[in-house]
Image (cartoon, grey):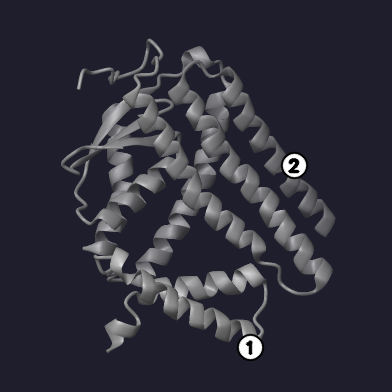
Amino acid sequence: MLEILLSILILLGGFFTLVGSLGLFKLPDFYMRLHGPTKASTLGVGAVLVASAIHFSVKTGGISLHEVLVTLFLFITAPVSAHLMAKAALHIKVRQEKRTLNKSDQEE
Amino acid sequence: MRSKFFPHPFLTLALWIIWLLLNNTVSAGHMILGALLAIFIPWFTAGFWEERVSVRRPWLMVKFFASVLWQIIIANIEVARLILMPSDRLRPGFVEIPLDLTSPLAISILANTISLTPGTVTCDLSQDQKSLLIHALHIDDAQSTIDEIKQLFEKPLKEIFN
């Protein structure tokens, strides 16, 4: 029973991570590609970490909470790096997809 | 007295919990060592934290984080769907969100939350700190995107920090 639950969590994690990478591969411009890895991977990594926490808690009999920290650090750092990349891209005026709404290649 | 030895009670608590989690233990020795670190680190770094963090209602904070976690799960499913559908149907765009928040901490939490949820990334904060520029992966209606963010994230943050 437990193993089924763990497998489901790991598969879910794998699926979302895969979709994130797929986004990185097929989306047309830099800003859109930014969404793939920053989002889809939070839930992907999250699901794998929950599986890890459950597995090691049961296996060792104690509670394993390292995973909570990994999640915490990931959630703190992911938006910051995404923000910095987006800001840098705006600054050097990276090409934006033609159909982008309110294009921001304004002269500053 | 209190503010001299505990300039940032929340930071102290957070550091202590993180120390225990890092060591994955609740043994007495680590609790004491962690407590010492948690007291001295905020003490030594107090000079860098000009502004005192004041959280009016800690309980609302917990509720806010729970709702953000839920939003992140929904965001992931939504973004997965957007990525899997043919990408020429996507309508990406930039939106400017006017801010009602004033405290820098509240603004940065809002910006981070936006980056973590439904296909949106915070790109820039305007010079006067009055609006955030965000990029969204897919926009049906710019105004409804703005309203949604203001309603879901900014309103609770306003209640917590103001």
Q: Is residue A81 above or below residue B35?
A: above
Share a chain, discs 1 and 2? no
* Residue closest to the eye, B77 or A99: A99
Q: CA distance from mark 1 to mark 2?
A: 39 Å
Image quadrant occupied by the N terminus of chain B: bottom left
Q: Residue furthest top?
A: A98
Q: Nearer the viewer, residue A75 or A94?
A: A94
Which of the 4 image quarters holds residue B44? bottom left
- Residue A31's place in the image compared with B97, above or below, is above
Q: Nearer the viewer, mark 1 or mark 2?
A: 1
Residue B133 position, x and y percent, is 29, 34
The residue identified by callout 2 is A11
Where residue B89 appears, as percent x and y from the top left, is 48, 15
Label 2: few (<14), some (14–19) or many (≥20) C-alpha neighbours in 10 Å: some
Image position of B90 (left or right of B158): right
Above or below A82: residue A64: below
Q: Look at label 2 and name its amino acid.
A: Leu
Is residue A98 something that shows in the picture? yes
Q: Position of residue A81 (x, y in %)?
A: 46, 40
> B117 and B107: which one is in front?
B107
On the question of residue B77 being in view, the answer is no
Judged from the image, the secondary structure of the residue bearing numbered disc 2 is helix
The numbered dot on residue B123 is none
Residue at 19% x, 53% y: name it.
Answer: B102
Residue occupying the far left of the picture: B128
CA neighbours of label 1 inside 10 A, class few (<14), some (14 to 19), many (20+) = few
Query: In terms of secondary structure, where does tag 1 sit?
Result: helix
Q: Amino acid at mark 1?
A: Ala
Quarter of the figure that contains the C terminus of chain B: bottom left
Q: Which residue is mark 1?
A: B28
